[in-house]
Image (cartoon, rainbow, N blue to C red):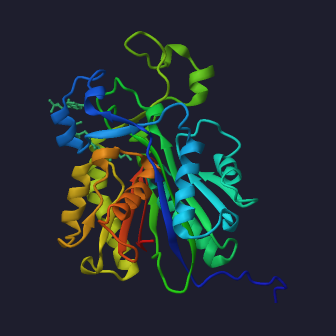
Amino acid sequence: MSKIKPSKGAPYARILGVGGYRPTRVVPNEVILETIDSSDEWIRSRSGIVTRHWASDEETVAMMSIEASGKAIADAGITPEQIGAVIVSTVSHFKQTPAVATEIAHKIGAGKPAAFDISAGCAGFGYGLTLAKGMIVEGSAEHVLVIGVERLSDLTDLEDRATAFLFGDGAGAVVVGPSQEPAIGPTVWGSEGDKSETIKQTVSWNELHIGDVSKLPLDSKGEIKFPAITQEGQAVFRWAVYEMAKVAQQALDAAGISPEDLDVFIPHQANMRIIDSMVKTLKLPEHVTVARDIESTGNTSAASIPLAMERLLATGQAKSGDTALVIGFGAGLVYAATVVTLP
Ligand SMILES: CC(C)(COP(=O)(O)OP(=O)(O)OC[C@H]1O[C@@H](n2cnc3c(N)ncnc32)[C@H](O)[C@@H]1OP(=O)(O)O)[C@@H](O)C(=O)NCCC(=O)NCCS
């Protein structure tokens, strides 16, 4: 018989508040056309993107996260001291250690919570949410701050026709806390590492600094290119359209929710055509509000789902208590889908 006392958590968890931060600079497609041979019409029709936000030097990963977190904490109606853990999902924080989560935790006045970063690409929000739910139900934290934040403009090759128009910057945050009823469904998640080459950083930091310079990519002026995100667009597109609709359906089934029960669909904002295709495959009824934040935000990876959630609530397109299906997918390849009650 074990002498260890069991940990005691809440019966269930729910998202209590959401907040977002979008950098001040709005970048229209015209700016992208300065460095690639394309057209506003092509970018709009193939991706759905019209504008995106790019961060200034002052709009760091930490700064954007702190802004989004402040709003999420206020929206949740708690104080920063009540945060027991901070999880930051990002692929674009360039300092390997310490985790940016500790700086954010300190600067929002959260005291001494557990704080760590995770890397799960565009599925990062769902990964963080799943960890937060587990921590609350298990009892290691009462309130968990989950942040998705990216400065993808730093990792964008503006001369790459396949990606230059896709990415944006921003931060989205949610506070997850205890609940007396289920408000975050079972997560359907996974990875397909055999496809890890389809979305990746062009060169590693090691290769950049100590590697064979003759093998490094050069820009049109002959200068060594800073590492950037590259992808096999069509392969990723097909995977997202065919495989992710199945994962979304599994998350609905796991939560016992039919398309008719659903109020809101918040997929990762990667491409408007992927969103449209998923809506069709899942046979979502007309009454379901679909997040189409990509038009003015671009693909902000880990930040895309909480940013879209915040905007739907702020504009009245969705309301507190609505049932929403969220699904993220991207580099890894990784994915995570679940059904949540909106804060
Ligand atoms: C990137 C993406 C928008 C490109 O759209 P696409 O329809 O697949 O485009 P393709 O690469 O098949 O190219 C189609 C044509 O457009 C051309 N093209 C490619 N990029 C172009 C650009 N920026 N402007 C104009 N034409 C372009 C190609 O040369 C090709 O021309 P061709 O038919 O004469 O050979 C799309 O593949 C995509 O969104 N992929 C998935 C992105 C994603 O989900 N990422 C997840 C990251 S989390």
Q: Which residue appears at 55% of the width and 34% of the height?
A: 58
Q: What residue lies at 66% left-to-right and 81% top-to-bottom?
A: 9
Check the image and report above or below for 313 versus 53: below
Instruction: Tell me if 293 is positioned left or right of 307 in this view.
Output: left
Q: In which quarter of the image is the N terminus?
A: bottom right
Where in the figure is residue 290, as x and y percent of width and height?
Answer: 27, 63
Residue at x 40%, y 77% (from the top left corner)? 321
**Relative depth, front residue between 233 and 304:** 304
Give the residue furthest to the bottom: 1
- Residue 238 at x, y = what percent? 26, 50
Residue nearest the observer in this picture, 203 or 173: 173
Q: Quadrant of the C terminus?
A: bottom left
* Rendered-image quarter of ligand 1: top left
Q: Quadrant of residue 143?
A: bottom right
* Residue lying furthest right: 3
Let me know if residue 119 appears in the view.
no
Provide residue 225's location: percent of width, then percent of height.
47, 20
Q: For this rendering, which residue is in front, 228 or 92? A: 92
Total residue callouts: 0
User: Left of 1 or right of it: where is 147?
Assistant: left
Query: Taking 172 as reference, is 164 left or right?
Result: left
